[in-house]
Image (tube, grey):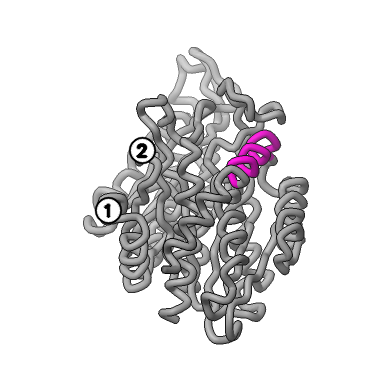
Amino acid sequence: MLSNKIRELAHKNHPAVVAIRRHLHMHPELSFQEKQTGLFIASKLEEWGIRHEHGWAENGVVAYIEGQTPESAVIALRADIDALPIQEANEVPYCSRNPGVMHACGHDVHTASLLGTAFILKQLTAHFRGTVKLIFQPAEEKLPGGASILIEEGVLQKPPKPAEILGQHVLPELPSGKIGIREGMFMASADEIYLTVTGKGGHAAAPHQFTDPVYIASQIIVALQEVVSRRANPIIPTVLSFGKINSSGGATNVIPNEVKVEGTFRTMDEIWRAEALATIEQVATGIAKSLGGFCEAKIKKGYPCLINEPRLTRRVKKHATGYLGAENVVEIPMRMTSEDFACYSQVLPACFYRLGTANDEQGINSPVHTNTFDVDESCLETGAGLMAWLAVKELEEI
């Protein structure tokens, strides 16, 4: 059985994939700076005789593995390759050697797993039809995001064009050996809000003589909560949070001239997203004007909603169950976090699932984006083997 061949190859190649993951973990690079990472990925593909192109969005790599009748069906698999600006606190032999930079979101796992998938598929080209397009994408962690850049550069249009795309992401709440999956709405859009409120500062003991931007900013923050509580359809998940407020000048007895407010808006519906962002700007500027001040609203559009195409996701769940067993494929809830894989899901049928990485007995369960994040490396065998199996099975469906 082909599934057994894939399991055998995933197991046999597991030490090599662990070594790849550890190399990547030791040498993390920030978004748009992944030069050595891209070169390393390309060197592995070259070593295995896999056709590839290096230089997508400068540091990205796209590889091609052709089975029988390569043009008959095409599927894309994606991994992200960048790291985060975090100083690692783990005391492990493969700890980051780049001060202040760490693979704290598991992109080293994603990249190593996809390289493992590439190795497996390269051994099995006589056993599947079509072409697998492997996308090693830079800059997931920083706007505008590498996915949107690769799409603009034509990664999905350049022949062979994929009919669908799959991706996986670590989930430290889930034990290694399991995956989590959800069809339909899965991850939220994420936009950044920057408000600059201007008034006229002066002595805090005489507020009637001035225009207090602190007060105006507070009224804006409170009023904007109405966007969620009274403007949003209650069945559409929506979050508006402000995480930063500061003034230029000001003191206990000094009203400043200017206050800056920063926040995030997240939702699961693209039409409502556009309406809400327009409303946020309108309300903020309108309240400032009504109170005698001025508000400049800048909204930095981030990643869109991530939608797992239902029919594709149901098939992926079925294939994963056949490969891992029903007890290792679990339903997970939607998340208000965001991911630029969403850009692919807006233009192609897509499925993004989560790869369990935890081992509670060994104390490996720190959340992503923390300086103690690490994984049970047995997850790499699951990650590489499962994605190879899913690719082969989906090529049969296309």
Q: Amino acid at mark 2?
A: Glu
Queried whether the magenta region covers residue 18, the answer comes back as: yes
Residue positioned 34% across, 38% down in the render? 222
Residue positioned 31% across, 50% down in the render? 328
Q: Is residue 171 above or below residue 146?
A: above
| Element carrying mark 1 | strand
Locate the N terminus by quadrant: bottom left
Residue positioned 59% across, 52% down in the render? 80
Is 149 or 103 nearer to us in this picture?
A: 103
Asked whether residue 285 appears in the rendered view, the answer is: no
Circle number at residue 290: none
Q: Main secondary structure of the magenta part?
A: helix
Residue 349 is left or right of residue 327, and the answer is right
Residue behind mark 2: 173
Locate the C terminus by quadrant: bottom left
Report which quarter residue 198 is drawn in.
Answer: top right
Number of marks in picture: 2
Check contact, mark 2 vs mark 1: CB within 8 A: no
- The picture places residue 295, in percent across and down from the top left corner, at 51, 44
Q: Amino acid at mark 1?
A: Glu
Residue 69 is left or right of residue 239, and the answer is right
- The picture places residue 321, in percent across and down from the top left corner, at 31, 60
Circle number at residue 331: 1
Is 270 or 389 nearer to us in this picture?
A: 389
Q: Is residue 270 above or below residue 231?
A: below
Residue 11 is left or right of residue 94, and the answer is left
Which residues make up the magenta segment?
17-28
Is 298 or 85 nearer to us in this picture?
A: 85
Is 85 or 379 nearer to us in this picture?
A: 379
| Element carrying mark 2 | strand
